[in-house]
Image (tube, helix red, strand yellow):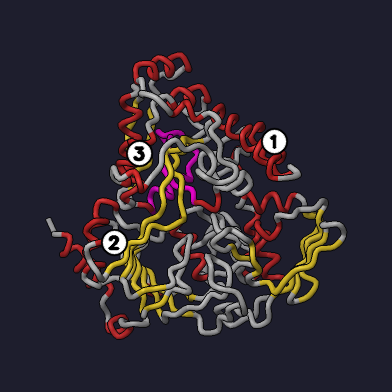
Amino acid sequence: MPTRRQFFAAGAATLASPRLAAAQGSRVLRFVPQADLAVTDPIVTTATVTLAHGFMVFDTLYGLDAEYNVQPQMVEGHTVEADGREWTLTLREGLRFHDGEPVRGRDAVASIQRWAKRDMFGTELIAVTDELSAPTDRTIRFRLKQPFPLLPRALGKVTAAMPAIMPERLAVLDPARPVPEMIGSGPFRFLADERISGARVAYARFENYVPRQGGVPSRTAGPKVAHFDRVEWHILPDPATAVAALQQGEVDWVEYAPNDLIPLMRRNRNIRVHVTDDSSISVLRFNHLQPPFNNPAIRRAILGALDQSAFMMAAFSDDRSLWRDGIGVFLDGSPMASEVGLNALRGPRDMEKVKRDLAAAGYKGEKVVILQPNDFPILKAMSEVALDMFTRAGMNAEAYAGDWGSIVQRRNSREPVEKGGWSVFVSGLSAAGLLDPVAHLGLRANGTRAWFGWPDSPALEDLRREWMAAPDAPAQKAVAERIQAQFWQDLPYLPLGQYPRVTAYQSNLQDYQAGLSTFTGIRRV
């Protein structure tokens, strides 16, 4: 069996070519992402790795700073008229796509329309839009049926699906299928001919990118300045291999630092371990279309088996400073978070009672298939805990283990498990999407138009609309508490706990940005 060092050496040999060897140096950033880039189109999938790729290649009309404030990004500014029912957005001068074509208003219109067919926030915006047009090459106009003050936030969201602006010729294509070219107007060009599945992804700085003037770089807002001519993603699924490569200076940045190796990395003066202020909530997502979890009573019964701390310890060690349990729907500590229903998570877990509750709910031994990505250590660990939880609860559970690419493909299936379907999978929802019910990917419950799992809850949908219409923050808070109460009845997913992202990089890198891994601003000194 090859050693971890031999494993990395084999990966390095794959990367080595005269062209690439010459590129190595201070102008190259070598990055280890959380998983391989299975899908490149940020409209087609909600995978976080694709989202990070998307913000390299594409730009958005608005950006979000570290405090989650919306700022103009591709737009110079906007005007609002007709009592909030007409918005005119003006594009900045000098915006160009990677193929040399200027970014025009009609490109943005087609891109917004494509995105809105896949994204729940976009769906809300288009539902209140009477007309979306491009009066000139530099303007975009929304004529609305009613005021929609969240318009900039929708067009600047930093969670999947990304409102990426692409050429009209690509944006008019089927949003359920990846576009054939990665042509954006972002700060980096995707080097498709250098992509090696499971080994390498590469990008080059887009020399014609024009950062916006003024402000400071912050998350996806402010001037996006690329200090590296080239960024290479090295796919190293084994955490120990990735850390060894970081210690030897063979890579510059490991996106997810494995918690059990943090003490080792902290002893190395050439490595900086950074606990980010960008938290996520892990979730166990049910398939609501197929037995047994199409039965809400069965979903509620299994809640009695949930031990959030077990999931968190398996993925993030027993260091409680690196995770929290007792987590509900919204990000802990955020304005919409509440204690409603959290008593269901407290106290000893009684598996015999869970078995009785499952039987009373109508469970008849149907197979439960858990999607387990073996090349994604955090999700693999939590998937193993899920398998143990279901088994101890007396359910007929098994894991479907594969690489992240095969897991992403299988979770598209709506077939029964006997025909290639699935029952549950583990994923993470990032902070920016957990602050309110509008951008909350896991909370949307509009049936087959919802996120994978496809829950259908008219009650949750009505409450989300009520929250949007609430006149002030106290009223929103009251609705959010009712949303969490309804959540425990419908259980679109199980919350597994909250954790900050811990990342590690060479100490000669500075100006690391908050939030999603981005590759502008950061530089070597």
Vertical order, 277 against 491 (above or below)? below
Vertical order, 11 against 355 (above or below)? below
Vertical order, 159 against 17 (above or below)? above
Work out which quarter of the rendered image holds the N terminus and state it: bottom left
Q: Which residue is mark 3?
A: 311
Question: Which stretch is magenta?
Answer: 405-430
Q: Amino acid at mark 2?
A: Leu
Per the rendering, the mark at residue 141 is none
Count of numbered circles on the image: 3
Q: Residues within 10 Å of mark 1 (few under 14, many from 20)?
A: few
Numbered disc in front, either 1 or 3? 3
Q: Could you tell me residue 173's position as x and y percent?
A: 61, 62
Point 63% across, 35% down: residue: 460
Numbered disc in front, either 1 or 2? 1
Q: Residues within 10 Å of mark 3 (few under 14, many from 20)?
A: many
Q: Amino acid at mark 1?
A: Asp
Q: Which residue is mark 1?
A: 462
SS at circle 2 = loop
SS at circle 3 = helix
Instruction: Looking at the image, tell me whether mark 2 or mark 3 is earlier in sequence order.
Output: 2
Q: Could you tell me residue 75's position as x and y percent?
A: 68, 72
Q: Amino acid at mark 3?
A: Phe
Q: Could you tell me residue 451's position as x and y percent?
A: 54, 44
Q: Residues within 10 Å of mark 2 (few under 14, many from 20)?
A: many
Residue 473 left/right relative to 309: right
SS at circle 1 = helix
The residue lying toward the viewer, choosing from 514 and 162, is 514
Q: Could you tell me residue 355's position as x and y percent?
A: 38, 18
Per the rendering, the mark at residue 236 is 2
- Name, please, the residue furthest toward the right: 82
